Amino acid sequence: MKATDYLRKQHKQVMKLFKEVEKTEDARGRKRLMGEIVSQLKVHTTIEEEIFYPAVREIGTEKAEEEILEAVEEHHVVDLVLAELPQVDPAADTFEAKMTVLKELIEHHVEEEQDEVFPMAEKRLGKERIAELGEQLEERSEALESRAA
């Protein structure tokens, strides 16, 4: 699978979890979904930063560098919110607010990646390299998920 397709698939999965959280009323269900979101986002940001972003940086353009620097900073902000989530009571009003902010951060990040970074990577890195990166992303994701389980 192409790296960009693999990352898009992960984007869709986490956005689906956000929709489920919005529909869930009970604290136990919210807490479970919150845990899944945190877990998936941690895996996703790790593989992007370890594998995908360094490959995009290899493109060597100012645009590639700017996009990756911004993406890493967005990951940092997401990490700050993720660190606070375990202390938020899933039954409290603050839970919904925190999840809304996190969802909006992710939506913005996903949009920029899919509209700017992915097309650049596909064009400049080529099909073979994108496929190779896809395999690496998948392998690393599986390793991180099995370690967390």
Image (spheres, grey):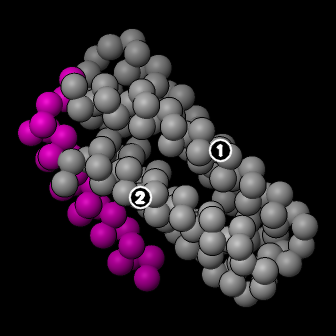
Q: Secondary structure at mark 2?
A: helix
Residue displayed at 73% across by 87% down: 28
Q: Is disc 1 surrounded by few (<14), some (14 to 19) or many (20+) residues within 10 Å? A: some
- Provide the residue span drawn in magenta: 124-149
> Residue 76: x, y in percent?
60, 43
Does the magenta segment cover residue 52? no
> Residue 81: x, y in percent?
71, 54
The extreme top residue here reads 62
The circle on residue 10 is 2
In the displayed structure, does residue 19 sit left or right of residue 139? right
Q: Quadrant of the N terminus?
A: bottom left
- Give the amino acid type for the residue marked by disc 1 in the picture: Leu
The extreme front residue here reads 23
The circle on residue 45 is none
Nearer to me, 124 or 77: 124
Nearer the N terminus, badge 2 or badge 1?
2
> Residue 138: x, y in percent?
26, 61
- Determine which residue is flagged by label 1: 105
Q: Quadrant of residue 100?
A: bottom right
In the displayed structure, does residue 62 sit left or right of residue 85? left
Residue displayed at 75% across by 50% down: 101
Residue displayed at 32% across by 14% down: 61
- Give the amino acid type for the residue marked by disc 2 in the picture: Gln
Residue 80 seen by the camera: no
Does the magenta segment cover residue 139? yes
In the displayed structure, does residue 21 sit left or right of residue 134? right
Residue 56, above or below 105: above
Residue 53 seen by the camera: yes
